[in-house]
């Protein structure tokens, strides 16, 4: 296990798709239920915000559907009209005006957004990543973060997928090649150690 070191002022917590239409629908997630993912993410928000890190809640959706992907595979998965609050970030995260909320229209939080610009202008070089779904939004964002040369820490108990196999595949085969895996408790402990 690599010793986890975090310099809070150079770190951002990027939270993928913890929004009402994804995390609060009662949808079955594995290996961690959505409520526990949200709870751990909220703990990370509190700890990282207190330490002075940048908080980046990311949500996916569209106001009119016209800026969403139109490839047939995406349409086959059943894009339909979204309820008014579908894109709202879950209230447990306690989003503040100082957070940088990103609305994405594709899987990665980097694609077509100002994510990289906002991180670089703040001299951030480390991303703590969590959210739903491990193998879709989280992994896509992680791959782009790797291509943009960011250090990454994956909060393994603050993410989940539609199946344990999907979650484990990303966690065990992709993430070790592009970052460090850690629990919420590990990350909070590293933040506390950085402030001693």
Image (cartoon, helix red, strand yellow):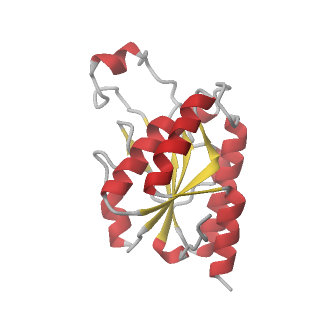
Q: In this view, does 103 lie to the left or right of 186?
A: left
The residue furthest bottom is 196
Residue positioned 30% across, 45% down in the render: 111
The answer, for residue 31, to whether it is visible in the render is yes
On screen, residue 159 above or below 165: below
Give how far across and how far down residue 80 sits, in percent. 43, 17
Q: How many labels does the image show?
A: 0
State whether residue 98 appears in this view: no
Which residue is at a point 48% across and 58% down the rendered structure image?
A: 179
Which quadrant does the N terminus fall into? bottom right
Please provide percent x and percent y for residue 94.
63, 54
Name the residue located 71 percent from the left edge and 48 percent from the top edge.
Answer: 39
When the figure is inspected, residue 90 is found, relative to residue 57, above or below; the finding is above
Q: Is residue 112 above or below residue 4?
A: above
189 with respect to 5 (left or right): right
The residue lying at 62 percent from left, 49 percent from top is 156
Q: Nearer the viewer, residue 49 or 123?
A: 123
Residue 28 place in picture, x, y as percent: 66, 25
In the image, is 45 to the left or to the right of 174?
A: right
- Closer to the camera, 96 or 164? 164
Please state, as top left, top right, bottom left or bottom right, where the C terminus lies in the image: bottom right
- Give the x, y percent position of residue 91: 64, 46
Query: Which quadrant of the figure has residue 178?
Result: bottom left
């Amino acid at each position: 296990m690599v010793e986890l070191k975090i310099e809070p002022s150079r770190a951002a917590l990027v939270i993928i798709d913890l929004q009402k239409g994804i995390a609060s629908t009662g949808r079955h997630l594995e290996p961690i239920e959505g409520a526990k993912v949200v709870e751990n993410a909220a703990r990370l928000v509190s700890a990282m915000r207190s330490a002075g890190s940048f908080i980046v809640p990311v949500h996916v959706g569209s106001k009119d559907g016209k800026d969403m992907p139109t490839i047939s595979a995406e349409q086959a998965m059943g894009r339909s009209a979204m309820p008014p609050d579908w894109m709202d970030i879950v209230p447990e995260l306690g989003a503040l005006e100082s957070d940088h909320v990103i609305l994405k229209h594709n899987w990665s939080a980097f694609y077509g957004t100002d994510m990289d610009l906002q991180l670089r202008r703040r001299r951030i070089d480390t991303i703590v990543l969590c959210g739903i779904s491990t193998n879709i939004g989280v992994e896509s964002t992680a791959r782009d973060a790797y291509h943009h040369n960011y250090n990454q820490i994956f909060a393994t108990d603050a993410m989940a997928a539609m199946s344990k196999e999907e979650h484990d595949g990303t966690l065990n085969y992709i993430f070790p090649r592009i970052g460090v895996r850690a629990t919420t408790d590990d990350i909070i402990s590293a933040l506390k150690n950085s402030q001693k």
